[in-house]
Amino acid sequence: MKYIRRICCGFLIFLAANIPLLKYLLISKDIIIPKFGGIILMLLLVVGVIVINIVPALSNRRIPGKRLKICADGCELLIYFLISVSASVLCLLAALPVLFQGNKMTWFGNLACMVLVEALVFWSGIIRVYLTSAQIGIKWRAIGIICGWIPAVHLAVLVKIIRMASDEWEFESGKIMQAQERKDEQLCRTRYPILMVHGVFFRDFKYFNYWGRIPQELEKHGAVIYYGNHQSAASVADSGKELAGRIRQIIDETGCEKVNIIAHSKGGLDSRYAVSCLGMDQYVASLTTVNTPHRGCIFADYLLNKIPAAAKDKVAEGYNSALKVLGDETPDFMAAVTDLTASACQEFNRKVPDCPGIYYQSVGSKLNAASGGRFPLNFSHQLVKYFDGPNDGLVAESSFPWGEDYTFLTTSGRRGISHGDMIDLNRENIKDFDVREYYVGLVNGLKERGV
């Protein structure tokens, strides 16, 4: 049905874009249409184009969410544009030898009409897509603008943008409806609330969630979420102390007795320290570490040994100064990095044993190729691979496993799953890996265990 609609709408736009040529053909073929009837026909075509621009597809009214409706409408208009502009260009080329023999003004008039109508449909569609699509990102927006002036190439890029935006609204619509259908199941309503602990060099900002779209998805399914709110860079011991204070605060304010910790990257080491060394074992039901370097990073040892002390001090000073402005009270770049080395983690694991009565599990992922990661992980992937082997762009696969259960994730093909992908850092929909659904399953597993 949608294909018939697209062909019909594209054909209507094509007719409106070629009114001068249509009028010429009717006259040349002695097809007599009363003057009043001709005006009515043209008005109907113009009104039809306006209506299509306002409501490209009635079926899109059923799409949940205003943003997704607008994105879907934009995609439809761009598809209509591709159909109509292709037909219009072919029509103009076919009419060129005929009209240029004695009626050039009709041809140029038709060209002007075509440009006007097709531009209206194109800009109405592309603006909607650019304003609402999250998945095309800055990269494809820029490519679209640059390649928009290159004949043929601009059509190929437009098809790519339409495909990406269409996949987005269809996928996101499905997720919204799925969440609505199983809302009453409360899949993530665990006995104890979830404490989400960020990794190094990030903070829990109010308007930019470190965990991307994951917390909102968990809350849709009944989860109660809290955040670590600790500094971005500090030693494991100092970060552990901050987390211990945060756990006590949550217990005191809510009376929840315990929490389930989900910790990413260095946050897993910080959490282990708080649990094993600061008495938080009595307040923690489970600890799930995500892409945590439990055995450290050999390449970090190498870099710290090779980089001149003056350069290290300069970088540390710059970072610490910047993060004080952003909210860290006593950031310590060098302490954080040093505690992530393989040598430091070896000593850490010897001194920080797991506590009985707590469920420990871990998750890890792998980039299949450097190109699968966003900067700077696409750059660091090869460096980590040289020293540590297969990795997520930052941490080696061999460093992830910890606890009773371990899950390893990747995708088919060259993409893989990066260190940032595991926390939905880029809000990217990855083929073969729905990060939000993965976390729903992860937390549902905690619920099934009674924690």
Image (cartoon, rainbow, N blue to C red):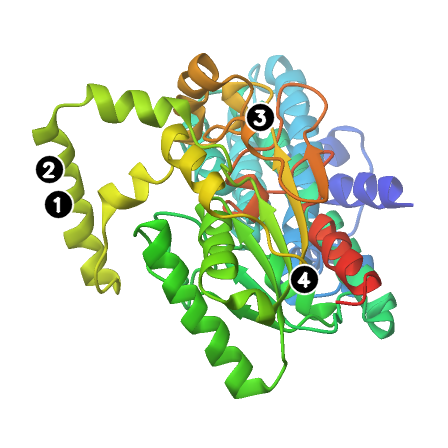
Q: Earlier in the sequence, mark 2 or mark 4?
A: 4
Q: Which residue is mark 4?
A: 217
Q: Which residue is mark 3?
A: 398
Q: Which residue is mark 2?
A: 314
Residue 287 shows in this picture:
yes
Residue 279 picture location, percent across and down? 49, 67
- Foreground tag (4 vs 1): 1
Q: Earlier in the sequence, mark 3 or mark 4?
A: 4
- For the residues labelled 3 and 4, the Cα–Cα distance comes to 30 Å
Q: For the point 50% across and 72% down, which residue is it?
A: 247
- Crowding at mark 1 (Cα within 10 Å: few <14, some 14-19, many 20+): some
**Front-lying residue, 214 or 247:** 247
Q: Earlier in the sequence, mark 3 or mark 1?
A: 1
Residue 35 shows in this picture:
no
Q: Is residue 211 left or right of residue 307?
A: right
- Foreground tag (2 vs 4): 2
- For the residues labelled 3 and 1, the Cα–Cα distance comes to 32 Å
Q: Which residue is mark 1?
A: 317
